[in-house]
Image (tube, rainbow, N blue to C red):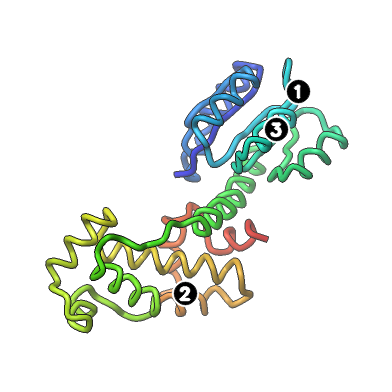
Amino acid sequence: MYRAYFVDDEPLVLEELVNNPLFAENGYQAVGSSIDAVKAVKEIRKLNPDVVFTDLKMPDCSGVDMMEQLRETGADCAFIVISAFPEFAEQRRFFLLGGFDYLLKPVSDDNLQQLLSRLAGKLAGKKMAGALSPETPSPELNKIVAYMREDVAGQHTLESICEKLQVNRAHASRLFANHLATTFTAYLTKLRMEEAARLLKETQKDIKEIAVLCGFGDYFYFCRVFRKQHSCTPTEFREGTK
């Protein structure tokens, strides 16, 4: 799930926003909230959420001021301003700082749903781009993973790869569990979804073609797996990375 932090100086508005079921339904988890923007800056630095939803007009520190302070210290989370004030100067400053979207109150569920879908695409692409190297202390596991990465579309099984690379199957299964905290099948799916995200972001290939290139003969199954991994459809992901 994507980790979200919420800021609004009106307690009832903040509570309503945090408890909106659309967040959980779209893969967002509230990791913190505050009615005090100054306090929020400290908590956001500590919690490092994926996205911050903030009001614009607040005592002592506006939502854009708060964003600027966080950007100066290296925070790279996405920012959404939800405000009743359509002020051009603040909107311009917000987007110059790299803000994702600026919504006017009252926000309808339809508008929020559209935003959360687009945002999920952006966050999923960011997570894929920032994925850690798969290198582990095990040369055997590194060899297996490298082979999988070279051909994500291949109809691999742990048994077929182990036979080809002359690695004991049970030993390989333990390596995935001990070093990557996952299974062979789950890791192969992760690699395929990573490649799908790259192709959606960097190419204009048809989504059905991308599904095949990532080892999925069934387009609809590919879409279900992608949505489960990224909390958005392939189309929403592509639109969110433009």
Above or below for 24 versus 226: above
Q: What is the quadrant of residue 8 in the picture? A: top right
Secondary structure type for disc 3: strand
Q: Reading the chain from its start, which is encountered first: label 2 or label 1?
A: 1
Residue at 40% x, 67% y: name it: 191
Q: Which residue is mark 2?
A: 211
> What residue type is disc 2 on?
Ala
Q: Residues within 10 Å of mark 1 (few under 14, many from 20)?
A: some
Q: Which residue is mark 3?
A: 82
Viewer-side residue, 180 vs 63: 180
Above or below for 67 versus 2: above
Judged left or right of residue 120, residue 143 is: left
> What residue type is disc 3 on?
Ile
Secondary structure type for disc 1: loop
Secondary structure type for disc 2: helix
Where is residue 227? Give x, y as percent: 46, 57
Judged left or right of residue 173, residue 134 is: right
Above or below for 108 versus 188: above
Q: Which residue is mark 1?
A: 57
> What residue type is disc 1 on?
Lys
Viewer-side residue, 106 vs 214: 214
Residue at 59% x, 42% y: name it: 77
